[in-house]
């Protein structure tokens, strides 16, 4: 295992054992749930929007290390992003998981790049992001909130 792979593994283990932004989000403006039947992962994603900016993102649920680490890294990366930036991040992340090509602007999220080679875990890594996708579409449909 290379030094980089080892570092990525440490990031995933750290986020799965001590997930960031885990718990209920009082005052959430958007809530969406996702389920990955092939592994049993469940995630509930809560967003708090101010206009089109995600001021807070939290999640609850139960799942494997990959799904929890992905949700933890995702909610960390979402804070302070606009809806458009979040959608762009989701596209870049999904592309990385499918093709293995890292996107430089993904920051710590590149730790999950190796999931590309673990075909049974792809759905685990993308579950929080698919849930985000639904939430973003819902937010776009309802428009900015004053
Ligand atoms: Zn899983």
Image: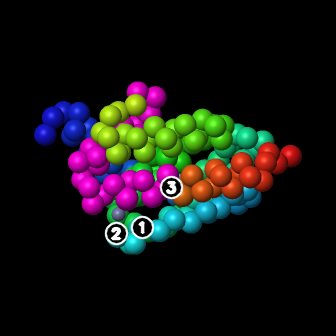
**Residue at image mark 2:** 39
Q: CA distance from mark 1 to mark 2?
A: 6 Å
Residue drawn 60% across the image and 35% down it: 85
Q: Residues within 10 Å of mark 3 (few under 14, many from 20)?
A: some
Residue drawn 44% across the image and 34% down it: 106
Residue drawn 51% across the image and 65% down it: 34
Upstream in sequence: badge 2 or badge 3: 2
Residue 82 shown in magenta: no
> Between residues 50 and 138, which one lies in front from this camera angle?
138
Q: Is mark 3 within 8 Å of ligand 1?
A: no
Above or below: residue 83 compared with residue 130: above
Tell me the number on the disc at residue 36.
1
Q: Are marks 3 and 1 in contact (CB under 8 Å)?
A: no
Tell me the number on the disc at residue 137.
none
Q: Quadrant of residue 122?
A: bottom left
Range drawn in magenta: 104-130
**Which quadrant, please, contains the N terminus?**
top left
Q: Are marks 2 and 3 in contact (CB under 8 Å)?
A: no
Q: Residues within 10 Å of mark 2 (few under 14, many from 20)?
A: some
Across and down, in percent, residue 110 comes to 36, 37
**Residue at image mark 3:** 130
Q: Are marks 1 and 2 in contact (CB under 8 Å)?
A: yes
Q: CA distance from mark 2 to mark 3?
A: 15 Å
Q: CA distance from mark 3 to mark 1?
A: 10 Å
Instruction: Answer with the quadrant where ligand 1 appears in the image.
Output: bottom left
Q: Residue furthest left?
A: 1
> Between residues 31 and 21, which one lies in front from this camera angle?
31
For the residue labelled by badge 3, is the local secondary structure a helix, a strand or a loop? helix
For the residue labelled by badge 1, is the local secondary structure a helix, a strand or a loop? strand
For the residue labelled by badge 2, is the local secondary structure a helix, a strand or a loop? loop
Upstream in sequence: badge 3 or badge 1: 1
């Amino acid at each position: 295992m290379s030094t980089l792979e080892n570092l990525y593994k440490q990031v995933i283990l750290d986020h799965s054992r001590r997930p960031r932004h885990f718990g209920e989000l009082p005052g959430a403006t958007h809530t969406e749930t996702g389920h990955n039947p092939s592994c049993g992962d469940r995630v509930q994603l809560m967003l708090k929007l101010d206009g089109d900016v995600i001021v807070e993102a939290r999640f609850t649920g139960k799942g494997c290390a990959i799904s929890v680490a992905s949700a933890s890294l995702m909610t960390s990366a979402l804070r302070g992003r606009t809806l458009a930036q979040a959608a762009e991040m989701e596209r870049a992340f999904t592309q990385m998981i499918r093709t293995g090509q890292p996107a430089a602007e993904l920051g710590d999220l590149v730790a999950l790049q190796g999931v590309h080679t673990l075909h049974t875990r792809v759905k685990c890594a993308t579950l929080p992001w698919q849930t985000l996708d639904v939430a973003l579409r819902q937010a776009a449909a309802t428009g900015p909130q004053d």
